[in-house]
Image: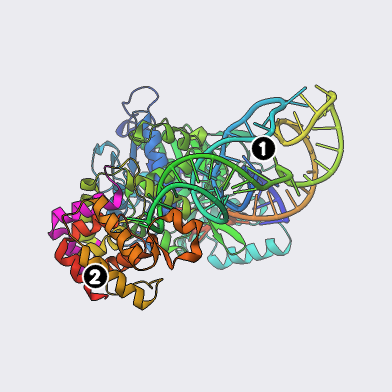
RNA sequence: GGCCUUGUGGUCAAGCGGUUAAGACGGCGCCCUCUCACGGCGCAAUCCCGGGUUCGAUUCCCGGCAAGGUCACCA
């Protein structure tokens, strides 16, 4: 058969030669050992923790080696396209400190552009044509129904499903048959003529998984769909070669198609890049666990963490602790270090999927927020508040001085021990609410109504905003004593029957009356910040 | 079902032939204390199972089992 003629009929016209493309997309001029990685999402616009997990890996591997990460958009499937998706992905990742050096909507070095696969149609066709000319690819006229029927038959006979060997009907079509189909205007796809034999297995070194066994591919996978657009497999080979990716980082679900990619690279005459297949983030789902899913787990979207007000560094720290097993230890020793100083290594990545653990993230978040100064916290809250805060919350920023004092108190700034009461911006705003709004409701008092009134009145009589903390507390004790509560905890513990309760119960009355809550930071300071007038008003209201 | 991957406490995990099997999160006690938070001190773990190899296996080998992934003109 004249493959050249066939190629011309299938993909008519002049296409540049492989040599042309090799020259157009030359090897990158980077220092020795520099890695080129990429993130290649499809433009659905939805990005979740699992994607961040992957993106951080790409970014770290590239930048730790003075290399480059780029963003390529895999838009070969029209059905997945969503407007504004690319910008959304970029901004979501940027928020969590993943920045690309080049790529779609980013710019940078244009040498390897375009980064949208739809815009690279000519390159794929040029190489598909070359494969046809060499007899390594052929047209297939099977319809979807044909393929479904084939699959059903194979399933019924307990054979391996797919288009291969004797089942690859169009593989051995005669010249006449092909042209007859073509003349009849039948749609076709281009398939790879696989030379592999699944009996053959070999070892392959994966940068993350270590040595894995690969079974030779024998599937005649489609490389060009009937609309002339490449499938993922083909685009991957062409793009990662010409964009000069040195190491392909992707989810382990791709491990299964690695044999296809290996054969494709060989058929195209491209050197194989290195690969690192990372495990995916899992989620407990009833009895079993499964990998994070866009559709089922919207609460795991990056947007969700922004809305809740998670501190971006905390999310990154959590991702890194899952990503590299020795990160946590390193971070314990270097709590204030630049995260990018951590010697990130692909080989240190876990081989099995980790369950996403919100408790752990929350713990990290508390710690990260506790490292902030009240000024930094105010800044973080203000940025968050502008975008996600309620109208009432936005007013908190009007009185800057009060906000600072409130934050300093709530975070324990100045003391040796920081408070860790909140994990997110939204919780923090809720926590400081009582400084700016009178409590709408009060938690239940432990003492009787009569005792409550007596305590409040007793305190109101003595209260003087000019008192220092010690004097203030001694007055609380006086109030306790005069109402039958133990002024000293020790006395109460030794002889609980002799008292109605202790100073702690008295303090609680004052605390709930002024803040609405039983749990707050130091009450004396709270009263100082509120000021005498406001404090008296709140106490009086509960008498 | 075929193929691939993984298997240490509830979770993340260190460990690489001899260990009281680290650490972190969570849980539970106790202490500190005007509450809470913080902090401090404790407590709880048959290393999936069965065979081998070895003086000795969580660590090496084989076989099970379990879990996950994948088998599209989706990525």
Tell me what residue is drawn at x 39 percent, y 65 percent.
Answer: A485
Foreground pick, A464 / A218: A464
User: How many discs mark residues in the rendered view?
Assistant: 2
**Magenta stretch, residue numbers:** A388-414
Query: Which mark is drawn over residue A539?
Result: 2
Q: Is residue A112 above or below residue A226?
A: above
Residue A308: x %, y % from top left: 33, 60
Decide: few, some or many residues near mark 1? Use Cα within 10 Å; few <14, some 14-19, many ≥20: few
Which image quarter holds the N terminus of chain A?
Answer: top right
Decide: few, some or many residues near mark 2? Use Cα within 10 Å; few <14, some 14-19, many ≥20: many
Tell me what residue is drawn at x 42 percent, y 30 percent.
Answer: A343
Chain of the residue where label 1 is placed in the rendered structure: A
Mark 2 element type: helix
Tell me what residue is drawn at x 19 percent, y 68 percent.
Answer: A536
Query: Which mark is drawn over residue A177?
Result: none
Residue A154: x %, y % from top left: 68, 61
Foreground pick, A428 / A461: A461
| Residue underneath mark 1 | A201
Chain of the residue where label 2 is placed in the rendered structure: A
């Amino acid at each position: 058969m004249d493959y050249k003629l066939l190629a011309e009929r299938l993909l008519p016209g002049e296409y540049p030669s492989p040599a042309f493309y090799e020259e157009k997309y030359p090897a990158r001029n980077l220092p020795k050992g520099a890695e080129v990685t990429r993130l290649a999402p499809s433009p659905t616009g939805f990005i979740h923790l699992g994607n961040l997990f992957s993106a951080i890996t790409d970014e770290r591997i590239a930048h730790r080696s003075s290399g480059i990460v780029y963003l390529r958009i895999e838009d070969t499937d029209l059905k997945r396209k969503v407007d504004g998706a690319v910008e959304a992905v970029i901004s979501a990742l940027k928020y969590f400190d993943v920045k690309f050096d080049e790529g779609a909507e980013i710019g940078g070095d244009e040498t390897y552009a375009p980064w949208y696969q739809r815009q690279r149609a000519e390159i794929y066709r040029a190489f598909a044509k070359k494969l046809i000319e060499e007899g390594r690819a052929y047209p297939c006229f099977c319809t979807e129904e044909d393929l479904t029927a084939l699959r059903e038959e194979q399933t019924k006979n307990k054979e391996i499903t797919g288009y291969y060997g004797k089942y690859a009907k169009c593989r051995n079509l005669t010249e006449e048959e092909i042209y007859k189909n073509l003349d009849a205007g039948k749609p076709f796809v281009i398939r790879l003529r696989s030379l592999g034999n699944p009996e053959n297995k070999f070892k392959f070194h994966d940068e993350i998984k270590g040595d894995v066994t690969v079974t030779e591919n024998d599937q005649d996978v489609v490389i060009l769909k009937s609309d002339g657009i490449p499938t993922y497999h083909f685009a991957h080979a062409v793009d990662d070669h010409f964009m000069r990716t040195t190491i392909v980082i992707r989810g382990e679900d791709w491990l299964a198609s690695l044999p296809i990619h290996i054969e494709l690279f060989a058929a195209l005459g491209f050197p194989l890049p290195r690969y690192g297949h990372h495990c995916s983030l899992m989620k407990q789902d009833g009895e079993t666990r499964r990998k994070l899913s866009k559709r089922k787990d919207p609460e795991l979207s990056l947007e969700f963490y922004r809305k809740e007000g998670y501190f971006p560094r905390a999310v990154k720290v959590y991702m890194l602790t899952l990503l590299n097993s020795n990160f946590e230890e390193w971070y314990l020793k270097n709590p204030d270090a630049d995260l990018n100083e951590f010697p990130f290594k692909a080989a240190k990545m876990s081989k099995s999927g980790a369950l996403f653990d919100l408790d752990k993230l929350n713990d990290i978040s508390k710690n990260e927020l506790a490292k902030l100064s009240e000024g930094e916290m105010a800044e973080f809250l203000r940025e968050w508040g502008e975008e996600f805060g309620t109208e009432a919350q936005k007013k908190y920023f009007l009185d800057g001085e009060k906000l600072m004092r409130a934050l300093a108190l709530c975070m324990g700034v100045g003391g040796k021990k920081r408070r860790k009461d909140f994990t997110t911006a939204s919780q923090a705003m809720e926590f400081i609410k009582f400084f700016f709004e009178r409590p709408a409701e009060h938690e239940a008092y432990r003492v009787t109504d009569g005792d409550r009134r007596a305590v409040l009145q007793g305190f109101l009589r003595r209260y003087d905003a000019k008192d220092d903390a010690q004097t203030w507390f001694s007055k609380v004790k006086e109030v306790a004593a005069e109402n039958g509560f133990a002024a000293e905890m020790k006395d109460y513990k030794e002889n609980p029957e002799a008292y109605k309760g202790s100073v702690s119960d008295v303090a609680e009355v004052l605390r709930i009356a002024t803040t609405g809550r039983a749990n707050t930071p130091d009450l004396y300071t709270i009263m100082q910040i509120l000021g005498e007038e406001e404090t008296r008003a709140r106490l009086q209201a509960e008498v």
